[in-house]
């Protein structure tokens, strides 16, 4: 491994290319602070971190630095739903309204749970205008979703439910278990595995969080500019979905995702806060045993990587592939192969499992990239893992 002063950690023999790739991200100046962890056969084989967690104070980025990971959170929420399906508590093909009766309003009575998980329900945005404070209360969002008519005929096409995914799936979890999805995840997933991963961060952990930032490049690729113009146009579905019709923003001095209010609420599609170690450990436990704990049985793990939606995405305006709550290997989100499943987050974070390689992958960072598709830092790490595995 190339020795860089800002990179620390370990890589087992044979995983030097992964350590080099992580270091290269820093050498090229594309990182502020970041961490990466890889589990293979239930144990850590790569554990790296480096850079600065908080440029304002100079606090270094360490292995226990907490990071908000945006849509990488969806993977944790999907694990909860699939775990309940595995236990027979949720039928993925049953109507959502059989668990959440109010959801039947506005012609949604036959939408199955599976369509919530595969972005086919037609509910990526709301006609009801909500404030940031109402979003943090959660109940107003859930009530608005129950009343919302679909924006397309459910099941006919798919479109990324960037924020609504979490509240939709989370409410099904709450109706079935009597616990919020954040509480269920803590009790049934994080605690048994010893994870530092929260959907709704306790106040006592707040000081460990690395604030997010975005540095705009001096030159932006013309194709990216053209795409952004269409994607972010006024009233474009992508902009509505990513900001919940203006209630939330992603960048700027007042980025709401850097606030205590946003960290404390349960936003199960976007405000998960974790470490690379815990993200990797979480996914490793979906395809194998980690210190005596395994989340998914082989059938559930196999189902997780089965395609549910594929092709043009009504929200993201690119081709996407989704399983039952998870992103799958694709040019938009490169993973290891056809039996990989996980989720990327805005700005670059990525967590996934691969059943063939029996691994869990976790990458987190505090400098957000501009890429809508594959973040080059995460992609470099995926390619290095592939080389190391031969």
Image (tube, helix red, strand yellow):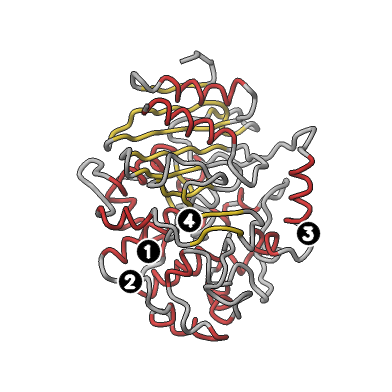
Question: Rounded to the nearest whole Å, what is the CA distance between mark 1 and mark 4?
Answer: 11 Å
On screen, residue 93 above or below 37 = below
Q: Label 4 crowding class (10 Å Cα cut-off): few <14, some 14-19, many 20+?
A: many
Q: Residue at x 78, y 59 (%)?
A: 233
Task: Pick the residue in front: 23 or 325.
Answer: 325
What numbered label is drawn on residue 233? 3
Of mark 2 and mark 4, the one earlier in the sequence is 4
- Circle nearer the N terminus (4, 3): 4
Give residue 90's mark. 2
In what element is the residue under mark 4?
helix
User: Residue 196 vs residue 24: left or right?
Assistant: left
Image marks 3 and 2: residues in contact by CB distance under 8 Å? no
Which of label 4 and label 3 is nearer to you?
3
Q: How far from the left and from the top, in percent, is residue 205?
A: 46, 45
**Residue 74: mark in rendering:** 4
Residue at mark 3 to residue at mark 2: CA–CA distance: 38 Å
What residue lies at 33% left-to-right and 43% top-to-bottom? 284
Q: Are marks 1 and 4 in contact (CB under 8 Å)?
A: no
Where, by quadrant of the figure, is residue 27 drawn? top right
Residue 81, label in figure: 1
Q: Which mark sits nearer the N-terminus, 1 or 4?
A: 4
Q: Foreground: 328 or 233?
A: 328
Q: Residue at x 57, y 74 (%)?
A: 140
Residue at mark 2 to residue at mark 4: CA–CA distance:
18 Å
Disc 3 secondary structure class: loop
First in residue order: circle 3 vs circle 2: 2
Where's residue 330, x and y in %? Answer: 52, 46
Question: Would you place residue 334 above or below residue 298 in this image?
Answer: above
Choose top left, top right, bottom left or bottom right for residue 231.
bottom right
């Amino acid at each position: 491994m190339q020795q860089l002063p800002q990179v620390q950690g370990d890589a087992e023999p044979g995983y030097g290319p992964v350590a080099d790739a992580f270091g290269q991200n820093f050498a090229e100046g594309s990182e502020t602070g970041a961490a990466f962890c890889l589990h293979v056969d239930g144990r850590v084989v790569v554990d790296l971190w480096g850079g600065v967690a908080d440029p304002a104070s100079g606090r270094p980025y360490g292995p226990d630095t907490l990071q908000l990971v945006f849509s990488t959170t969806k993977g944790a929420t999907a694990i909860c739903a699939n775990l309940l399906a595995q236990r027979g508590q949720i039928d993925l093909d049953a109507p959502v309204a059989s668990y959440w009766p109010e959801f039947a309003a506005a012609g949604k009575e036959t939408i199955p749970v599976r369509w919530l998980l595969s972005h086919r329900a037609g509910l990526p945005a709301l006609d009801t205008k909500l404030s940031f404070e109402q979003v943090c209360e959660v109940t107003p969002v859930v009530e608005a979703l129950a009343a919302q008519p679909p924006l397309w005929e459910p099941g006919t096409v798919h479109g990324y439910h960037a924020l609504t995914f979490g509240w939709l799936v989370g409410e099904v979890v709450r109706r079935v278990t009597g616990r919020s999805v954040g509480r269920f995840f803590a009790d049934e997933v994080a605690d048994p595995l010893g994870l530092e991963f929260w959907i709704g961060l306790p106040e006592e952990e707040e000081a460990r969080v690395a604030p997010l930032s975005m540095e705009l490049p001096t030159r932006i690729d013309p194709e990216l500019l053209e795409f952004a113009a269409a994607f972010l146009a006024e009233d474009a579905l992508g902009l509505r979905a990513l900001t919940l019709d203006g209630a939330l923003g992603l960048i700027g001095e007042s980025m709401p995702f850097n606030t205590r209010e946003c960290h404390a609420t349960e936003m199960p599609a976007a405000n998960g806060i974790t470490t690379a170690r815990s993200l990797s450990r979480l996914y490793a436990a979906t395809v194998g045993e980690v210190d005596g704990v395994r989340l998914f049985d082989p059938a559930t793990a196999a189902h997780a990587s089965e395609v549910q939606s594929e092709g043009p995405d009504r929200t993201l305006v690119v081709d996407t592939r989704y399983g039952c709550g998870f992103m799958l290997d694709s040019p938009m989100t490169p993973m290891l192969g056809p039996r990989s499943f996980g989720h990327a987050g805005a700005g670059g974070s990525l967590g996934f499992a691969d059943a063939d390689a029996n691994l869990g992958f976790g990458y987190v960072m505090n400098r957000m990239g501009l890429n809508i598709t594959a973040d080059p830092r995460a992609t470099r790490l995926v390619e290095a893992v592939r080389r190391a595995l031969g």
